Image (cartoon, rainbow, N blue to C red):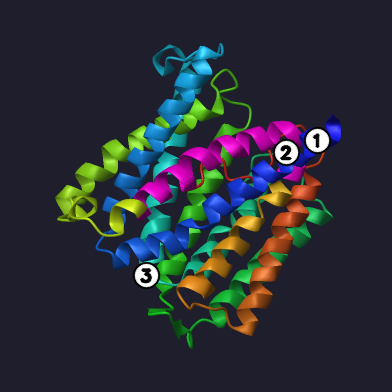
Amino acid sequence: MGDHRYLVGSLALILAASGFGMLGPVARLAYEAGFEPIAFVGWRAMFGFLAIVVIVAVATRRGMGVVNPLRLPRGDLAGLAAIVVAGLGVNIATFVAFDLTTVALVLLAFYTYPALVAAVAVALGHERLDGTRLVALLLALGGMVLVVAGAPDQARGGAAFNPAGVLLGLLAAVFQTLFVTVSRGRLVAVPAVQVMGWVLLAMTATCIPLAAVLGDALDVPLHGGPALGLVMLAGILGAGLPSILLLFGIRAIGGTRAGILMLIEPLVGVTLAAVLLHEALLPIQVVGGGAILAAALLLQRGARGDGRDPIAVPLAERT
C-alpha cells in the first residue's frame, strides 16, 4: 500500500511539474495569438480560479470546510495578504519576462529562489549557514553569472536576450521567496487549495482592470482562433489542477522528495521552448543552469527532517 501511494504521489508531482513547466511556451504562443502579458495573466487567473471553485465545491461535499479569511487571526490575515501580493508579483513579473526574452532564461533566473529562501532564512536566524547552504548559494550565484554571460549572442526563436527579462525573472524569484518565507508556519488552518483560490481571485480582480488601463485588448479570446484554448490550457492545466496535484504529492511522499521532483519543471519548460519555439541554451548557459538546479537540489536535500516546508516547491508559483 505504501509503495502504491508513493508511486501515485510521484506521478502526481511529475504531472504538476509538467503543468507548471509548459506555461512559458504556452504564454509565448498566446502572445503570438494576440494576447498582451497582463491581459493573459488576468484571463488565465480567471480560468484557474473557476477550476479551483469546482475543486473546492467537490471537497466541501466530502467534509472540507470553507475558511472565511476575515475570521482569521490578525497575523494569519496579514500573512494571507502578503501571499496574495507575492503570487501577484510572481505572475506579473514572470509573464512579462516571457514576452521579453527566452523561456529558458526566465526559468533559470526564477529558479534562483531556493537559494534566496535559504539566504533569507539565515538572515532571519531561522537556519544556520552550514557548508551545504554555503555551497548551494555559491552555485546559484555562479550559475546565474554563467547564464547571463552566455546570453548576449543568443537570438533564437525571435526572442533575443533582454536584460530586463532576466531581471524580471529574478524579481519573480524575490516574490517567490516572500511567499515561501511568509508561508512557513502560517495559515495551517486554511487548506492550500483555498489559499491558491484567493490568490487567483485577487489576480483576476487586479490584472483585468490593469490591462484595461494599459490599453490591452481584453476580448482576444472571444475572436476565435487558438487564443481561448491557450489561455484555458494555461489556467486549468497550468494553474488549477497542478496546484491540487502538488498538494496531493506533498502529502503522499513528503516535502523533500516532492521538492526534488518539482525540479522537473524548468527541464520541461526548456525542452518545450526548444521544440515549440526553437529556443535553445548555449553550452555555457547549460552549465550555469545545471549549477542553479544543483543548488536547488542541495538545499532541498538539506531540508530533510527540519520540519519546515520544502524550499524548492513553488506553491504559489504562477498560480
The amino acid type, in three-letter code, at marker 1 is: His
**Residue drawn 70% across and 31% down?**
251
Using residue 174 as the reference point, say whether residue 8 is left or right of it.
right
Label annotation for residue 4: 1
> Where, by quadrant of the figure, is residue 182 drawn?
top right
Using residue 226 as the reference point, say whether residue 284 is left or right of it.
right
Q: State whether residue 125 appears in this view.
A: yes
Q: Which of 31 and 211 is in front in this view?
A: 31
Where disc 1 sits, the SS reads helix
Residue 295, position as x, y percentages in the image: 72, 60
Where disc 3 sits, the SS reads helix
The amino acid type, in three-letter code, at marker 2 is: Val
Label annotation for residue 100: 3
Q: What's the CA distance linking mark 3 and mark 2?
A: 37 Å
Q: Are marks 1 and 2 in contact (CB under 8 Å)?
A: yes
Q: Which of marks 3 and 1 is in front?
A: 1
Q: Is residue 219 above or below residue 2?
A: below
Q: Nearer the viewer, mark 3 or mark 2?
A: 2
Is residue 270 magenta-colored?
Answer: no
Q: Is residue 292 above or below residue 314?
A: below
The amino acid type, in three-letter code, at marker 3 is: Leu
State the extent of the magenta-drawn residues as a range. 230-258
Label annotation for residue 8: 2
